[in-house]
Image: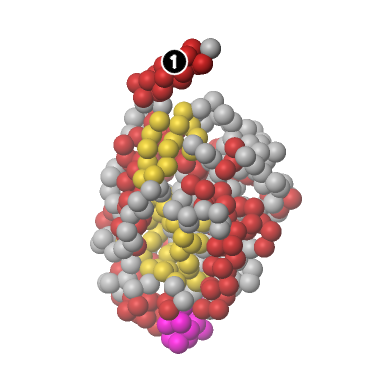
Amino acid sequence: MTLINDNLLLLRRQEKSFSMSFVTLRRPDDFHVHFREGKLLQTVAPYTAAHFGRALVMPNTSPPVVSASTLSSYRLEIMMACRTYSFEPLMTFKIYPALSAAELKALKLAGAVAGKFYPLGVTTNSGDGVSDLKAITHILLLMEELDLVLCVHAEQPEVSSLSAERLFLKHFYWLVETFPKLKIVVEHVSTAEGVALVESLPPTVGATITVHHLMLTLDDVINDFLHPHLFCKPIPKTTKDKEALLEAAMSGNSKFFFGSDSAPHDRSKKENHQCAAGIFSAPSALACLAKIFEEADSIAALEPFTSEFGAQFYGLPLNESSIYLEQTDEKVPRTIEKLVPLAAGKSLGWRVADDLSAQRTS
Ligand code: DOR
Ligand code: ZN
């Protein structure tokens, strides 16, 4: 009996290596994530820490991360929630015009790697956003000097949501010309025009691409029904935009790297007449990416996109450990506590081996 079992096991292993049902990946980083705060943070952050070596944590918490002391206490809260993982949060702060030079230097000393620019009112907790980019010129000059990266939510306020990114893009010419050494990231780029602009600008400009913008168009969000769990900012757009993003992600151009923009909101806030923007993608992001890259016959392009280009842009060493993606029929959980993850209830054909979500289904 044992011999039969052993032989079966051997056969399965051989089958697996023959059909390449495992993919080894240098441990990836997520260069754009929302961890929230309190109980929600405790729930969601471990899903990122289980798969990713590092994540760039967005500062649009309530209250926001705007000072060295809020940054340090937020980092501690994240590290406590992720203490069983080998995981490093990369901290950001929210840029606002009254930020003093002394506070900016203190933020740098406290370990900030980037500042996030939110135009006024364009997304979750951006009611305190900036209405005029030029009002933060003095801050951007100092960020350039201190080697702090500028992360930009690139949407023009108060215009049609389908045009918001396209209409914002002109500001990048001014940014690049005025701050030639400042590293700038176009966050969650969502249009063909955005991709083309990033390609055309100097190497100081890169872009994050989310997994949901590689999967969705507007028709997935609104067609026969409204799908609140797929509603996010910037809104997924046309097939042409999605194709440009897929091409950029798989191109091997190191300006484009992975940032999930995993942005959890409780079901009560999503399934609501004023649905909150944000997709909780952390538990299934890598499985979705494996499916997308495999289907495009580009699985070899996955590792640079998730595990190399972002670190290189931020001047960080590559992670040394690995994760394993394995083929499976397993389905993404329908819910995780009070949250609905991306691809809920679907079989993606892939999972991260030893995935935390396997233990926390409901
Ligand atoms: O959909 C989004 N949700 N886009 C953002 O830019 C912010 C995020 C959030 O914090 O909920
Ligand atoms: Zn975001």
Q: Quadrant of residue 342?
A: top right
The residue segment tinted magenta is 96-107
Up/down of 302 relative to 103, above or below? above
Query: Colour scheme used in the picture?
Result: secondary structure
Q: Find numbered disc 1 in the image and state the secondary structure of the residue it sits on.
A: helix
Query: Does the rendering let one see residue 85?
Result: yes
- Crowd class of label 1 (few under 14; some 14 to 19; many from 20; radius 10 Å): few
Up/down of 82 relative to 343, above or below? below
Q: Quadrant of residue 113?
A: bottom left
Left or right of 176, for residue 46: right
Q: Residue at x 45, y 31 (%)?
A: 326
Q: Amino acid at mark 1?
A: Asn
- From the image, tell me which residue sits under label 1: 7
Query: Does the rendering let one see residue 131?
Result: no
Q: Can you give x and y, in whole percent of width and height, for residue 262 in the image?
A: 54, 51
Q: Can you give x and y, in whole percent of width and height, for residue 141 in the image?
A: 35, 80
Residue 92 is inside the magenta segment: no
